[in-house]
Amino acid sequence: MDATGWKVTTIDYHTAGEPFRIVPQPPCEIPGRTVLDRRQNAMTGPADTLRQLLVNEPRGHSDMYGAFIVPPNDSGAHFGVLFWHKDGFSTACGHGTIALGAWAVRSGLVPAPDDGDTDVVIDVPSGRVTATVTTAGGDIDAVTIHNVPSFVAARGIDIETPGYGRLTVDVLWGGALYASLPAAAAGLGVTPSHLNQLIEAGRQVKAALADHPAARHPGEPRLDGIYGTIFHDGADAQTGALAQRNVTIFADGQVDRSPCGSGTAARVAALDASGELADGDVLDHFSIIGSHFTASVTGRETGGVVVGVRGNAFPVGESTFTLDPRDDLGLGFVLR
């Protein structure tokens, strides 16, 4: 697909330090009846060319994240979204959903009062989610996402890794499938000083589970696959009953700077199932850089627990990206 004729306008946000590049009007058609259909078509169509243009250097970087706004599945949602990263298109993105809620209200796409709560309903590949935007004095005070039902897919899976030996992991669903384990089990801590080792360990855990039955979604094959590895440590609580620090290594070694919204939902499901987080209790969830979400179970459904994850997102810039036909680097490159 030739991208040299495109002028791609983006609005960039960050949520708890994690980037999120929004494309309100993609310059190419992304066909499909549902958002999940569109994700499948995006993987091999012109949308993948657009993804590469925006995520690769020099316009992006190896840890860039973003989204294309697409039509919703039906009139029950305000819009649909396709999430993308360095290696493709994901099924869910909690930090991105927080950013989308803030963007929808700030842009006027979804009207909101100066004071109060406004629900922004969004169709994502894994289902329908709601971002409740809380405004105070005309400013966005917080965004709480109510995720698709989260659950524990499998507990106590023993795997062998080349660099970290035998590890025991749980597999959790929070809109994507995650492997989860204490960082100490791999001899690591959730600290920037251990970042390179955490990336390598996360890759090894994901690879070890590639063919495991737990890497399959129980109802939809298009949602199969371990998306990331969540390493967690204990932390001191600020506002909640329980606190943890985590880092999610997702896709092929990407590092979530935020506490990871869908990963937070998955961790709350695990803590709820184990009894570590009682009904009504709040989890303080910290990232590797110290940024913070709060989360709790807000409902129970047949498919799992509905988790509310509260944070905020802020705009950092607006851009128009182009590709000069004389540019030898074309769609760009990624060094890592």
Image: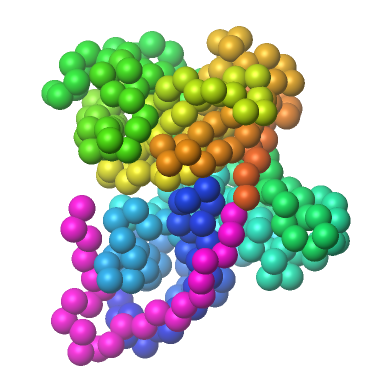
Q: In the picture shown, does residue 188 fall above or below 50? A: above
Which residue occupies 43% across, 13% down?
155
**Residue 16, x across and y down, in percent:** 52, 48
Which image quadrant for residue 253? top left
Q: Residue furthest left?
A: 162
Count all numbered tags in the image, as a single digit.
0
Magenta highlight range: 313-336
Q: For the point 48% across and 43% down, which residue is it?
A: 258
| Residue closest to the eye, 230 or 34 | 230
Q: Is residue 335 magenta?
A: yes
Q: Is residue 141 visible?
A: yes
Of 126 and 288, the residue lying toward us: 288
Q: Is residue 122 magenta?
A: no
| Image quadrant containing the N terminus | bottom left
The answer to whether 4 appears left or right of 171 in the picture is left
Task: Name the foreground residue: 186 vs 209.
Answer: 186
Type of colouring: rainbow
Dominant secondary structure, magenta: loop
Horizontal arrangement in the rendering, residue 259 relative to residue 191 (left or right): right
Residue 214 visible to the viewer = no
Tell me what residue is drawn at x 75 percent, y 64 percent: 110
Quadrant of the rendered structure where residue 224 is? top left
Is 135 rendered above or below residue 228? below
Q: Residue at x 37, y 30 (%)?
A: 190
Across and down, in percent, residue 45 comes to 36, 66
Q: Is residue 191 above or below residue 81?
A: above
Image coordinates of residue 264 in percent, x first then y, are 53, 33
Q: Percent x, y for residue 243?
A: 56, 23
Q: Quadrant of residue 271?
A: top right
